[in-house]
Image (cartoon, coloured by chain):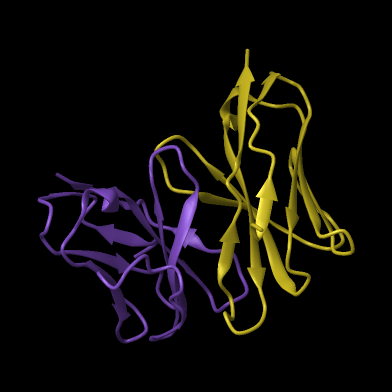
Amino acid sequence: GAGVSQSPSNKVTEKGKDVELRCDPISGHTALYWYRQSLGQGLEFLIYFQGNSAPDKSGLPSDRFSAERTGGSVSTLTIQRTQQEDSAVYLCASSLGGSGGAFFGQGTRLTVV
Amino acid sequence: RKEVEQDPGPFNVPEGATVAFNCTYSNSASQSFFWYRQDCRKEPKLLMSVYSSGNEDGRFTAQLNRASQYISLLIRDSKLSDSATYLCVVRERGSTLGRLYFGRGTQLTVWP
């Protein structure tokens, strides 16, 4: 596609359930980033992929969070046993290699009730 | 210490004004620099890259001072549509090989 695509755009889930968030980067972009943003707050780094490997996963808040990227393209962020503090907008971005600016998807708004 | 520091503002300026935002970064090995804008409840959008020689895009001018580890963004002839949060972004070299560090953002409101 022309831009970064994220799905779903909105997700409401019950506390304790697992969720999967998907990111489809711009074709040919080797770098992929996950951030999250709570209302009125800055961007919180979660994980960064270069190709299929994650040289930096230091931002994952707990072992309930995991992410993978396959085929150097689509990435999935999984949150297990969701908690209310996981509620946020999860943003994915991609860039061409590790040098240019990154382009964001529209995000997935996750609400844990 | 945060990797990227910005004055959060808010900056409230009239249409037509010139406004400048500043940003400092902590890692002297940083490689690439960018300004993004983020509208309320929207995703950040790349505004412009920042080069050592300084660069201009219409009403927007970005400057980088590597010695002082300082980045700036100047907006001339402000428009109502410039109202947004402006994010300073730095990419580092080294083991993280391209991770992007975002400042908290500077909020700008342009009033008629």
Taking depth in this image into account, of B77 and B90 the one nearest to the observer is: B90
Q: Residue at x 13, y 64 (%)?
A: A18
Q: Residue at x 85, y 64 (%)?
A: B66
The chain coloured yellow in the image: B
Taking depth in this image into account, of B6 and B35 the one nearest to the observer is: B6
Q: Is residue B95 above or below residue B65?
A: below
Q: Residue at x 37, y 65 (%)?
A: A61
Residue ranking furthest to the top: B112
Query: Residue A81, percent across and down?
Result: 15, 63
Q: Is residue B64 left or right of residue A39?
A: right
Q: Quadrant of the C terminus of chain B?
A: top right
Q: Is residue B11 left or right of residue A102?
A: right
Taking depth in this image into account, of A8 and B59 the one nearest to the observer is: A8
Query: Residue B101, percent across and down?
Result: 59, 62
Q: Is residue B56 left or right of residue B13?
A: right
Q: Is residue A53 left or right of residue B64?
A: left
Q: Quadrant of residue A79?
A: bottom left
Query: Residue A96, percent across and down?
Result: 53, 75
Q: Quadrant of residue A51?
A: bottom left
Taking depth in this image into account, of A113 and B79 the one nearest to the observer is: A113
The chain coloured purple in the image: A
